Image (tube, rainbow, N blue to C red):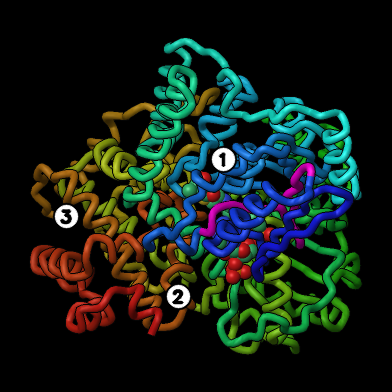
Amino acid sequence: MSDVVSYSIVDGIGIITVDNPPVNALSQAVRQGLLDAVRTAQSDASKAVLIHCAGRTFIAGADITEFGRPQQEPFLPDLLDEIEASAKPVIAALHGTALGGGFETALASHYRIALQSGKVGLPEVKLGLLPGAGGTQRVPRLASIEATLDLILSGTPVSANRALELGLVDKVVADDLYDEALAYAKQLVEEAAPLRRTSELDASAADKDLFDSYRSNQAKRARNLTAPQRIVDCVEAAATLPFAEGQRRERELFLECMQDPQSRAMQYMFFAEREAGKIIGLARDTQQRDVRTVGIIGGGTMGGGIAMCFANAGFPVVLVEINDEALERGLSIVEKNYAGSVKRGKLDESKAAECRALITGATDYAALADVDLVIEAVFEDPGLKKDIFARLDSICKPGAILATNTSYQDVDAIAAATSRPEDVVGMHFFSPAHIMKLLEVVRGDKIADDTLATVMALSKRIRKVAVISGVCYGFIGNRMLGGYFREAQLCLVEGALAESVDAAMYDWGMAMGPISVADLAGLDVGYKARQALPADEIGDARAHRVPDALVEMGRLGQKSGAGFYQYDPDTRKKTSDPLVTEVIEQAAQDLGIERRAIEVDEIVDRVIYALVNEGLRILEEGIAQRPGDIDVVYVYGYGFPAWRGGPMYYADAVGLDVVLARINEFRDRFGAENWTPAPLLEQLVAENMTIAEWARK
Ligand code: 3H9
């Protein structure tokens, strides 16, 4: 029939097989193949039609690589209408992840059988889209309105068994999906089962208040996002209009999403995330080391969180601390975190107990002699870290990977403390490590290819999004953050208030304003780090004036109950503190700065363009492999809004000439020390090129 869709008749059943690796996405060729096969089946000897897929999954959705180009016929909604209109029963056999347009194909079939290990879902919202091939109209004809909205608005797939409970599939089997599906099809033929067309069923009912409450809830939870509101509109249309009219509404709103810059940014992020895992200069099939056991040095918040990441993925972990007391404290934090995960419904009790049992403790480095990977997670003291690596060198078995979880330090210098720098790598986790998705993998000068390839593959097993960074102070994320925080702090002394800087950035889309982030991280962390640095590396001293004054007043941030804000000891709810405004005003006076009103636009541009400018330097120096990697770091590690696509994508979207003009304006107003445009920015503007175009060269 075609390269990607084949058709044959087995035992009277027309078997359509989709075989379009890696995930059987609905490319034009697959859509055409499906249409041809369904049409053939209408007039041949088959009595029913079975759609199934080769490889690891049923169709995982529309082919996202085709988005943004003119769509070619057959269009998916038309194809699915034709499948549903088939005069012979159509059965979909689901395994792997039946997602998006793939699940919509199943919903347009008359019966659905699924493998127990399979999942179904409509993740379009994660791409800034809505299910555009009948998903918003057919799901509420099988499941309740609440279940429909929860499924589509979360974008999170559900298990086959849950789908059965919801009425979204008809039968779940433990294994042998193909044989079971064939038998099911034959049984339906024998029973002369009706053509159960989903579009002909009545949609579930719900009153207007329910839709409105979802709208207002989404306005808070999915702040600034347009797709969730359109999804509620579509499902309301399903509940109130005949199928064909609802479908028209879905089409209109789907096309609106497609035109929306938010969706383009989120599609870009989808591919940037996958691209980040690829190591430039290394073959995809580079040999990997076998990692089965893990040792972690340091049972603090970070070490405990890292231990959980590995235990959750099934690795036995030994946590090493300096004495019994510290070890007990570390293990009790792990215990508390697991209890929290159970309470929040993230893990069930037995799974949590299973994971917890994988973590053991020790107070002697001898426990690390046989592990395959050691991660050092002690506090940021370069001397201590080097001592630890020298000890590991003498204790660990040959071939063990030795990783440091430093956020700033020179990984090459740490590697040089061992006789095996090829085995040393940076693994910079973000706090809380068992929750945050990002992992910066730091590639030292002497690292072996198989060390790097192993760590990148491992990061996928522990469900992190890994990005490779070269060695520099702060790597990609924290290095860029320097300018971001500097400008936020300078805005304060020049005239803004903590609340107005936070509000400007939060409203722009950041998960949290920079001043609140500083309080959360602890103002003493930067204070101590600055004291360890030579004066010429501290940066603009005016920017540290207020946080340093607060630390010296004992206001360390959230953990001490006060920093830039006051925190309720029980709820951690923050309130403004007039005393902080006084500290800011005093700092301005001491610095001879006359405070002025600062517009929101100025706050946003200073803070974000500082990020962009440093990002361009990082690119130019080759610290990041590609602009998308920087974007992934910021979206997954620093709360940058995915719908703006990360700082590099954002700069291209604004226009590099606009960014350069504004940076030049800031240079003229505030001085070249903080505002010298990155050479790459000037070069790209001169050559009339975007960052994305430069990266493709
Ligand atoms: C939609 O369906 C719209 C409709 O409602 C309406 C239309 C009118 N297209 O993630 P992985 C590639 S919107 C093209 O590493 P995993 C991916 O780039 C769509 N390519 O594997 C990667 O390529 P490479 C709704 C796709 O096992 C390779 O496959 N569907 C697509 O960790 C492996 O991917 C979704 O949003 C695609 N749809 O996870 C599902 N999907 O190797 C999106 C994947 O060159 N996909 N690729 O880097 C996923 O969630 C995961 O990929 C999946 C597998 C769970 C399927």
Principal SS element in the magenta part?
Answer: loop
Label 1 residue near ligand 1, CB within 8 Å:
yes
The answer to whether residue 326 shows anywhere in this view is no
* Mark 3 residue element: helix
As drawn, is 428 to the left or to the right of 387?
A: left
Q: Which residues are magenta?
A: 47-63
Q: Which residue is mark 3?
A: 591
Q: Position of residue 672 (x, y in %)?
A: 17, 73
Residue found at x 21% / y 65%: 655
Disc number lying in front (2 or 1): 1
Beta carbon at label 3 within 8 Å of ligand 1: no
Given the image, on which type of amino acid does mark 3 rest? Leu
Q: Kindly indicate the quadrant of the structure image that contains residue 351.
A: top right
Inter-mark Cα distance, 2 to 1: 28 Å
Cα distance in 3D space between marks 2 and 3: 40 Å
* Amino acid under disc 1: Gly
Three-letter residue code for mark 2: Arg
Q: Tag 1, which secondary structure?
A: loop
Q: Of marks 2 and 3, which one's residue comes earlier in the chain?
A: 3
Residue named by callout 1:
155
Q: Secondary structure at mark 2?
A: loop
- Mark 2 crowd level (few <14, some 14–19, many ≥20, 10 Å Cα): many
